[in-house]
Amino acid sequence: MDFALTEEQQLLRHSVERLFADHYSFEQRKRYLQEAGGFSGALWRRYAELGLLGLPFAEEDGGSAGGPVETMIVMEEIGRGLALEPYLATVVLGGGAIRLGASAAMRAAVLPKIAGGDLILGFAHSEPQSRYDLADVATKARRDGASFVLDGAKTLVLHGDSAEKFVVSARVSGGRRDRDGLALFLLDAAAAGVSRRGYATIDGMRAAEVTLTGVRVPADAAIGAAGAAYPLIERVVDSAIAALAAEAVGAMAAMHEATVEYMKTRKQFGVTIGSFQALQHRATDMFVALEQARSMAMLATMMAAEDDVRERRQAISAAKVQVGRSGRFVGQQAVQIHGGIGMTMEASIGHYFKRLTALDTLFGDADYHLGLVAEGGGLIAA
Amino acid sequence: MDLRFTPDEIAFRDEVRVFMREKLPPATRDKMIAGRSLAKQDMVDWQRILNAKGWAVPHWPKEWGGTGWGPVKTYLFRDEMQQAPAPEPLAFGVSMVGPVIIAFGNEAQKKKYLPRIANLDDWWCQGFSEPGAGSDLASLKTSAKRANGHYVVNGQKTWTTLAQYADWIFCLVRTDPAAKKQEGISFLLIDMKAPGITVRPIQTIDGGLEINEVFFDDVKVPVENLVGEENKGWDCAKFLLGNERTGIARVGISKARIRRLKELAALQQSGGKPLLADERFRAKIAAVEIELKALEMTQLRVVAGERNRNGNKPDPASSILKIKGSEIQQAITELLLEVVGPYALPDQIPHEESERWNEPPIGPDWAGPLAPQYFNYRKTSIYGGTNEIQKNIIAKAILGL
């Protein structure tokens, strides 16, 4: 039982820390927001140079065979820096689906491009009626000779407006909410019948609504066996939740440090507000919440590749609950302690608060996952 | 002890309810229900409808437009108005500067300003907080030096709500820098069109533009715009800050929001059934309803106590109303955030001028305002004296700690 990082992992952490310290001040971030796609194209190339975009992929696919811990390290720094680049969408979600489920040929064709910074992916799974249910898919994939024809509507596709390809879920059989009958396909964003509407999200990033009308894909565009994709979807989403948990911890840590710093410098009534015991206790409560979330993010990371699906699911959902609750508490209290400036877009605190709020809504909020843990029998066998 | 209202009070409440139903413009009501921001004209039109009925300033003395209702009817009126849901008259005018002018101003000031406040002919904003003077308001630095029949004002106010709409600003300014901090402050009325005033918008985390910084650069203000005595402005400030206390709980608004919450939770499907059918979610709503009922009872106790209390001294228990009222309002926005679920993610800009709601909406058409409302309402535990300050007031004034 070991929580230490290897030397290589520590090196990875230091290089990513340096990168963000040099390039992700709040002021620099404001400039990146103005770029097409809403993120820094130059930094995306820099991530590629540092090997970050290929981290989880096999070496023969252009990667460095990193695991969930490597992803956790990168995501925590992304959280600290409020980074805007499509790492989660491209590397963890889209890249994860291909890494875990695609044929060797598709992996060889796609993963090196991602690792090289030459391909942005979107993961188009959620639908307007699905809320948080991963099995709720109305988009249909009709077999037609050597092709499938896709029809349906996808929603809240992270970075869907910048994506050059989509990993799309569709139903080959079964009822709308059945786990059986799902398939994943790799699709060109420019394919005939694909339309999208891009928009800003509350955390300064971007997403898209994607509509598929008679979109024809060859049968070998399927990722894994068509009709049996649910376990793959669930596994990819679980790895994304573990990644998000790390990002949330990074954001919470940055907010907490900023709050303590503010308490040490802001003076009212002739003293620093940090001298008030009530606020000292509040900052301590925030610290406890942060560390509990960090612990559960580590659990999620260590369970992301767990073979026992039930164990994995319970751990990941439990982590999402903790991170959601801690994120809400740390976020709200950081704003409260900053007073009026916590309510402004000028200060970074409010932006962290909004990102934590957004993270809670991705792949199921804390309340949803609380239900899953409870319905799953909880964490302690009776 | 008796919870029942008298037949006269019930008839009055029904009269108010009918008036709200018939006279509140439907477009304004729809915006209030949906949580969308109002245009300046919406607020002006509505306050003039109220004023035409003689209901814009019920709590003022009768000679200036008050109704003489007493605390119970005033409470019923506010509750019905909030539940309509109708906008309340602009507080900066009718609840802040108006009562200050009534209590501390001279006849000329009353005649000049009060009717225009009641009819929202003049839109007022509040120049109190500064970057260095938040909770410690008395440490304010904006200065006013008297010379040749004018004050010359220099400094900066912040968090000034809707200054971009304002015709006038009431300001706490420092007229005696040598005096102990509360004792060198004056209360000045300043024309927003005076040369030297600059308004800079501050965007809030919900994307809106409801607050501003206001800069004063050698702004000349006639001495007759001083309210009360020079260097006695802190008395006006204490009066103002303590004055509007029973209204601050916003019980009626929270009732209206809970109705909206249930309406939307019935529409929003989760796991094949409406969210409202989920036992856990229903229990959470019930818990908030119970807190709200307790708050309402506390407010009624304060209102009933007002009948017996003499003069203008506020009940320190009103700090309870502010603390619990803000917590409940925030709790409701959290439940609404849960209803909107994944559709909290698309950005919406609620500011009325630019009207940048996503068109067509992304997700359900009711979803847009919910996340912005959650972000915006973090202010309720900060403004009007932070909840931490309110707790200090209770600890000191009631508990004697």
Image (cartoon, coloured by chain):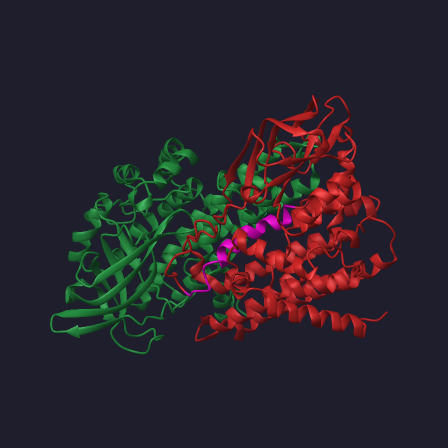
Name which quarter of the figure residue A316 lies in: bottom left
Residue drawn at point x = 31 percent, y = 74 percent: A180
Is A9 a magenta residue? no
Secondary structure of the magenta portion, mostly? helix
Q: Quadrant of the C terminus of chain A?
A: bottom right
Q: Is residue B393 left or right of residue B42?
A: right
Q: Is residue B268 left or right of residue A63?
A: right
Foreground residue among A303 and B307? B307
Q: Position of residue A242 (x, y in %)?
A: 41, 54
Q: Position of residue B211 (x, y in %)?
A: 55, 43
Could you say which chain is coloured red in the image?
Answer: B
- Residue at the bottom extreme of this rendering: A175
Q: Position of residue B230 (x, y in %)?
A: 77, 30
Name which quarter of the figure residue B24 lies in: bottom right
Is B379 a magenta residue? yes
Could you say which chain is coloured green in the image?
Answer: A
How many numbered marks appear? 0
Q: Position of residue B222 (x, y in %)?
A: 68, 30
Q: Answer above or below: position of B154 versus B371.
A: above
Q: Answer above or below: position of A36 versus A159.
A: above
Residue drawn at point x = 64 percent, y = 57 percent: B88
Residue A61 appears in the picture as rendered: yes
Residue drawn at point x = 59 percent, y = 36 percent: B192
Name which quarter of the figure residue A267 lies in: top right
Foreground residue among A91 and A279? A279
Q: Which residues are magenta?
A: B364-383
Residue drawn at point x = 46 percent, y = 49 percent: B353
Residue B285 appears in the picture as rendered: no
